[in-house]
Image (tube, rainbow, N blue to C red):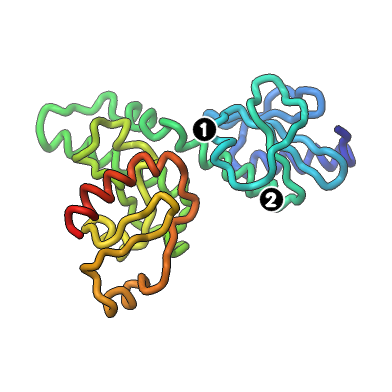
Amino acid sequence: MTWGPSAATLTLLEKLAVDNGFDRELPREGEWLAFASTRCPLRIWLSTSGEELFLVALSQGNVAMALDTGTAATSSLPAGAVAARAVTSLSALHRLVRRAFQLSKTLPHELLHTFEKQTATLPRSTEAERVVVQRVGQDIFRAGLLEYWEGRCAVTGLVVPELLRASHIKPWADCAGDAERLDVFNGLLLAPHLDAAFDCGFITVADDGAVVVSDRLGETARHILGLASPQFVTALAPGHRAYLPWHRERVFGRRG
């Protein structure tokens, strides 16, 4: 592994890390620059190989598995890293580091931990008090889905966060506990019309991400809702597939 222009490369990687959420610089490990964040548990290491290959090592295996940018790197990893990925451009490097930051803020139980911290001192004796706690959880869940889906509708790609809805796959009231309620994989970020259709069982999602439309929606309604042609959920992960059968059987199947 060899560095490009030393001073320029160091400055570039340091700025890139900070710009994408990694605001704590850690001691350098050989040719790896190390960073952590005050907002997520992930640590990353950045380096270069030659002039056109950028390397990112990560401390969380689940984040590495969820990344859809770059290729697996076989370089010798720094201590504490469990996987590494390589990209061939600065734009891809920005995307990779930012995506790793977003995933670390939500996986595997970061939303639950945030909820527990924010509600630890809140009373839950009365129904009104429990509603307040629930609203805190729902706000955290929505923020987590906005991070995971990068502020885009999981189906249409609509990028207007104010319009997007955090749609539970398995509803809050039906979850076994807060771990399910705050699991980022128990949700889809959807445009309002798709959120309503999903909640009412007019649509569901197959394990391959295909949006399945109920026979209760006629041809005219499908055209108006943008469901006349095949639609797909992007970035569907194995974690989502643990909840989708519940929706298909209990919401879509029951009302289909």
- At x 42%, y 68%, the residue is 230
Locate residue 219, reporting x and y percent.
28, 77
Q: In which quarter of the image is residue 83?
A: top right
Q: Nearer the viewer, mark 2 or mark 1?
A: 2
Residue 32: give x, y in percent of width and height. 76, 29
The tally of labels here is 2
Q: Where is residue 244 drawn, in percent x and y?
A: 33, 46
Check if mark 2's residue and mark 1's residue have beta carbons within 8 Å. no
Up the image or down, 35 lies above or below 252; here it is: above
Horizontal side, residue 254 vs residue 2: left or right: left
Which residue is denoted by mark 1 in the rendering?
A: 40
The x, y position of residue 178, in whole percent, is 28, 31
Instruction: Give the class, few, some or many, for how many residues have Cα within 10 Å of label 2's Cα (few <14, many ≥20).
Output: some
User: Label 2 to label 1, Cα distance in Å?
Assistant: 21 Å
From the image, tell me which residue sits under label 2. Answer: 92
Judge left or right: residue 47 versus residue 18: right
Q: Residue at x 46, y 54 (%)?
A: 151
Kind of residue at badge 1: Cys
Q: In which quarter of the image is the N terminus?
A: top right
At x 31% / y 34%, what residue is drawn? 180
Asked if residue 53 can be seen in this view, the reply is yes
Tell which residue pokes out farthest to the left in this image: 126
**Number of other residues with Cα within 10 Å of mark 1, as a class: few under 14, some 14 to 19, many 20 or more:** some
Q: In this view, does 4 lie to the left or right of 87?
A: right
Q: Which amino acid, by three-letter code, is at mark 2?
A: Ala
Quick one: SS at disc 1? loop
